[in-house]
Image (tube, rainbow, N blue to C red):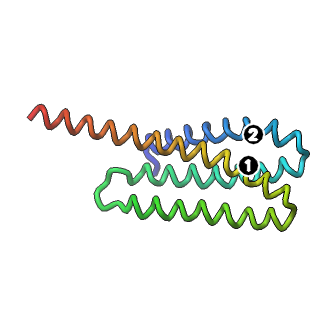
Amino acid sequence: MKTAEEMRYALLSTVVAVAAGLALFPVALTHGSDVLVWAFAGWLVATLIGVFCGTSLTAVHGNPGSGFLWLFGSFMAARVVALLAGLGIAQWHDPAAAWAYLAGLGAAWLATQAFEMIWFARRTARATRSDETVGCSR
């Protein structure tokens, strides 16, 4: 069962990815429906992987022996595989489709990755401050 913090992360990460997708939409729309479909495919792949991976990392972050770094590395590998697989399929379809896929993937990946870094930096800072507070009061 997901905790409130995991659900909050998933929701906010999705909102950030949707905002990135909406920013990409007008540009992709001007190049035709085929480009729009490939841009959406790239965006969807990166959004699903980004939200799932970040939510999973939220569940284990800060727990001793949780395998956080192993999960982080695995999820980065999954992102690379998704990039290469989708890019290969799009390139096989049409070189313009490959650029559209890459644009959609990049928009969502940058947004979810930036959100993930900020989320964990703030979470670590909060944990550090509370540790220092506990240490000072003793």
Check disc 1 and give the amino acid type.
Ala
Assess whether mark 2 and mark 1 are in contact (beta carbons under 8 angstroms). yes
Place of residue 34 in the rendered image (x, y in percent of width and height, measured from the top left): 89, 52
Q: Residue at x 22, y 39 (%)?
A: 131
Q: Position of residue 110 (x, y in %)?
A: 60, 45
Q: Nearer the viewer, residue 106 or 48?
A: 106
Is 116 above or below relative to 53? above
Q: CA distance from mark 1 to mark 2?
A: 8 Å
Apparent side of residue 81 relative to residue 133 in the rendered image (left or right): right
Q: Residue 19: x, y in percent?
A: 67, 35
Q: Residue at x 52, y 60 (%)?
A: 75
Q: Is residue 78 above or below residue 53?
A: below
What secondary structure is found at the residue carrying circle 1? helix
Check disc 1 and report the residue beneath it.
103
Q: Earlier in the sequence, mark 1 or mark 2?
A: 2
Disc 2 residue type (three-letter): Leu
- Residue situated furthest left in the rendering: 138
Tell me the residue at 32%/36% (across/down). Answer: 126
- Which mark identifies residue 115? none
Residue 24, numbered circle: 2
